[in-house]
Image (spheres, rainbow, N blue to C red):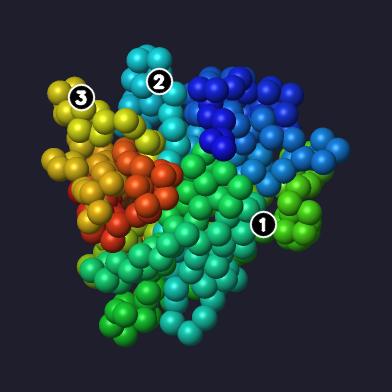
Amino acid sequence: MPVATGDDMTLDQTAPGAKLVASLLGARAAPVLATIDLDAPLSAIGPNGTVPRAGLAAALNVLLFDDLLARVPTGAAFVAEQRARDERIRFDHGAIRTVCLVGGDTGALPAGQAAIARILQPLGYAVAGIYPLPRLRMTGHAWAHRDQPELLPQFFVSELHVDQFDAQFQYVAQRVFGTSSDPLTEASRAALLQLERDESIPFQMALDVLPNFLSAFGRQHETPSLRDYEALLSQSAEAAWIATEGNAFNHATSRVADIYEAADRQRARGVPIKDSVEVSQNGRVRQTAFRADPVERPFAVEGSEVTRRVPGSFYEIISRDIDPATGTLDLSFDTGNATGIFAMTRAA
């Protein structure tokens, strides 16, 4: 049976997921909830009025999307244009970059994607595909929600394999990322254990820990030195990006019906978007993206700080066709597509 979408239902403002967003975003909640089509999972209610994992996952995605738009003016402009056309955003996926240091954890963080997986798994996500990115010396992991895979955004979590670089790069990466602290509190760990067991948690517990979950999607290491940043950049633009942005959303992606029409419309407006559309090998997944917006970031230089303009995050659009073998939406990714899209932070 098809699952209801935002077009089929009205958001239940009294549902736990919607109330979480309203409690944390205040006056901004109404326009954000009207923008993102996550009505079905946000309206879900667990036993005895608890927050089900799908509702909590949806609330986290809303907050992450809102955070990205605050950092990415081109994305905010695209979303505003969609709303002016009376179109809601179908949030397809968010992308996160992580680091695997040589020999173990990343400072106090679990190695690579494990730092994010420990949050995603209790929220109902599971790995739906693994995508080697050899040109970038990375591996991507697609996490899809077990309950509502077509409605809830996926997470594309990539790992940078430091052991595939030379000894000098490894030394610098250890110095930069080895300072990472672990943002998760004991209360958050307890909530994740309860979510894993019961697939829902009480509303007040969710409200207490959701801001801490959100903080895990940020930079956990100390301010890098300018020299170390440049050393990383000389071999990996992706490593340099993580040095300033950490585990923040590298990009957020909305699903559109006709990516070529949407891309042409942006080019006509003079928006800095890729010249081409990336098409998957099976032909069913098409992606393009805006150039990353620059941001000002601090760097340590001889005991003081300087500010430099560096690539920040960006916004992507995607279209997906039905997989004829399953009759469902093709939610897969493509190594070639991903490699091409990752270059948008270099283009900045």
- Quadrant location of the N terminus? top right
Mark 2 crowd level (few <14, some 14–19, many ≥20, 10 Å Cα): some
Choose top left, top right, bottom left or bottom right for residue 38: top right
Q: Tell me the residue that label 1 is attached to.
A: 122
Q: In the rendered image, which residue does mark 2 sit on?
A: 87
Mark 2 and mark 1 lie on one chain; the one further toward the N terminus is 2
**Residue type pointed to by label 3:** Arg
Q: Secondary structure at mark 2?
A: loop
Residue type indicated by callout 2: Glu
Please tell me whether residue 15 is drawn above or below residue 164 in the rendered image. Answer: above
Dot 3 alpha-carbon crowd within 10 angstroms: few under 14, some 14 to 19, many 20 or more:
few
* Dot 3 and dot 1 residues touching (CB under 8 Å): no
Q: Is residue 43 left or right of residue 312?
A: right
Front in this rendered view, residue 103 or 87? 87
Relative to 65, say whether 135 is above or below.
below
Between discs 3 and 1, the one toward the N terminus: 1
Residue denoted by label 3: 265
The residue closer to the viewer here, 101 or 149, is: 149
Residue 144 at x, y percent in the picture: 51, 52
**The residue positioned farthest toward the right in the image shown:** 48
CB contact under 8 Å: marks 2 and 1: no
Q: Is residue 217 visible?
A: yes
Could you tell me residue 341's position as x and y percent?
26, 51
Marks 3 and 2, Cα distance to the nearest angstrom?
A: 15 Å
Residue 151 placement (x, y as % from top left) = 52, 39
The residue at the point 50 percent across, 29 percent down is 36
Q: Position of residue 278 (x, y in %)?
A: 21, 48
Q: CA distance from mark 3 to mark 1?
A: 40 Å
